[in-house]
Amino acid sequence: MGQPKRRQEPRPEVPGRIGLLTVEEEQNLARRWRTCGDRQALTRLVQAHLGFVVRIAWTFRYGGSSMDDLIQEGNIGLSLAANHFDPNRGARFATFAERCIRSCLSDCIARSYRQVRICTTSSHRKVFFGLHRARRAIERRGESVDGESLAKELGVREEDVAVMMERLATRQVSLDAPRSEHDFRSIGATLPTDDPTPEELVGEAEFKDHQRRELLAGLKVLDSRERAIIRARHLQQRLVTRVELGRRFGISHQWVEQLEARAMKKLREFFLERTSEKGSLSLTSLEI
């Protein structure tokens, strides 16, 4: 018995496709767009070649991207080509647009190959799409396949081949995947982070409480007006100006400044008398 025939996949339909253009029609539409900015002419030129995009995208269907994505990217390349097509050079539009369409499709395949983009330069793209072909060509000649021979075959630097070989060999793992069959925690949940540990959080809270107690003790060495000025100037989220405090106490803002300086001096002397193990204090770090 003969081998069963491979089932042919149906080609997608081309929405909005219209009939093919003659050379004269194609050149006329391109000139109307370039000279007059006639968008209807541009649309007619693009729609006449939508089927051409589908035929090219069909050859990329095994690259990992869906046909819808490929056709969309190919249409972008077609539109770019239509904007730059010069009918006076004598080439058919399809010939001019093919390279642009294939370039967009290649970019689409390279982007969808991994969640993290691996082709960052044109040389990387050349290695990505030509690696297997170059390896087969070298093997057919009976030569050894290494980084140097691959780079020479592809016309790129050996460093580019080494970078792409490493990237292609790296296995992609989702951070949401379980660690193992028996450990259902996600891989991302077990990775180290820069967040503080529970011990660090407790230590920080205890230090804040220690600062607050020391500061409250220091405020007791001030008189009521000095204490009010320090609270208003340093221990509130909204700091009160010296002018406002002067109006509140019926004195000038210069006198408020002197009272503030005297109160700060008292506090510094008080904290200097405390033992060094109490730790340093910062007035602006607390709100009372």
Image (spheres, rainbow, N blue to C red):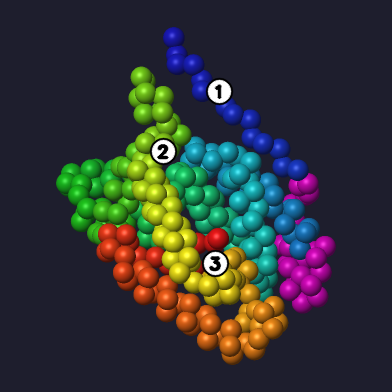
Above or below for 108 versus 80: above
- The residue type indicated by label 2 comes to Gly
Q: Residue at x 78, y 58 (%)?
A: 44
Q: Quadrant of the C terminus?
A: bottom right
Instruction: Identify the disc placed on residue 7.
Output: 1
**Which residue in the structure is indicated by mark 2?**
188
- Asked if residue 56 can be seen in this view, the reply is yes
> Do the residues under discs 1 and 2 have CB atoms within 8 angstroms?
no
Q: Of the residues under marks 1 and 2, which one precedes in the sequence?
A: 1
Q: CA distance from mark 1 to mark 2?
A: 42 Å
Which secondary structure is most common in the magenta stretch? helix
Pick the front one: 15 or 203 = 203
Instruction: Identify the disc placed on residue 70.
Output: none
- The residue type indicated by label 3 comes to Leu
**Which residue in the structure is indicated by mark 3?**
235
The answer to whether residue 108 is magenta is no
